[in-house]
Amino acid sequence: QVQLVESGGGLVQAGGSLRLSCAASGRTSSSYTMAWFRQAPGKEREFVAGISRSGGNTNFADSVKGRFAISRDNAENTVDLQMNSLKPEDTAVYYCAAGTVWLPARWPTSYDYWGQGTQVTISS
């Protein structure tokens, strides 16, 4: 089993930056493909970014390409999401996810473990 805990959420003005972190415990994070999803009230959970087990492959939603970056530190068992040039439409609860897929998948059903989420609010 894997436990995931997100941190770093908060309130940021449009155009600002925020860095989210996901800490994994249990099995080592290097065993899993990791991803970030987000969900706004009344909307479906949306893929944001994913990273392969070794960090060699990444995948981003079109809405965040060029603004967000995902990275992982397998020695520390963490995966981060650096968010720049934030927009009000980025407001959501952000979730960290882990799965056994070889490459970062875009669908929530591809992932087996989920964190509790961290709120990100962007003001205009």
Image (tube, rainbow, N blue to C red):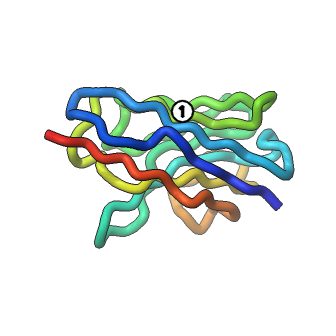
Residue under the image location 44 percent in, 43 percent down:
9
- Residue 104, how many percent across, how many down? 60, 47
- Residue 42, how many percent across, how many down? 29, 72
Q: Pick the residue in front: 11 or 64.
A: 11
Find disc 1 in the rendering and name its residue: 70
Side (left or right) of 43 relative to 109:
left
Element at label 1:
strand
Residue under the image location 33 percent in, 61 percent down:
40
- Residue 12, how many percent across, how many down? 29, 36
Q: Pick the residue in front: 43 or 9.
A: 9
Residue under the image location 62 percent in, 39 percent down:
51
- Residue 66, how many percent across, how many down? 36, 27
Q: Pick the residue in front: 96 or 12.
A: 12
Label 1 neighbour load within 10 Å: few <14, some 14-19, many 20+:
many
The image shows residue 65, relative to residue 7, as above or below, that is above
Hey, which residue is sitting farthest left in the picture?
124
Side (left or right) of 95 relative to 97:
left
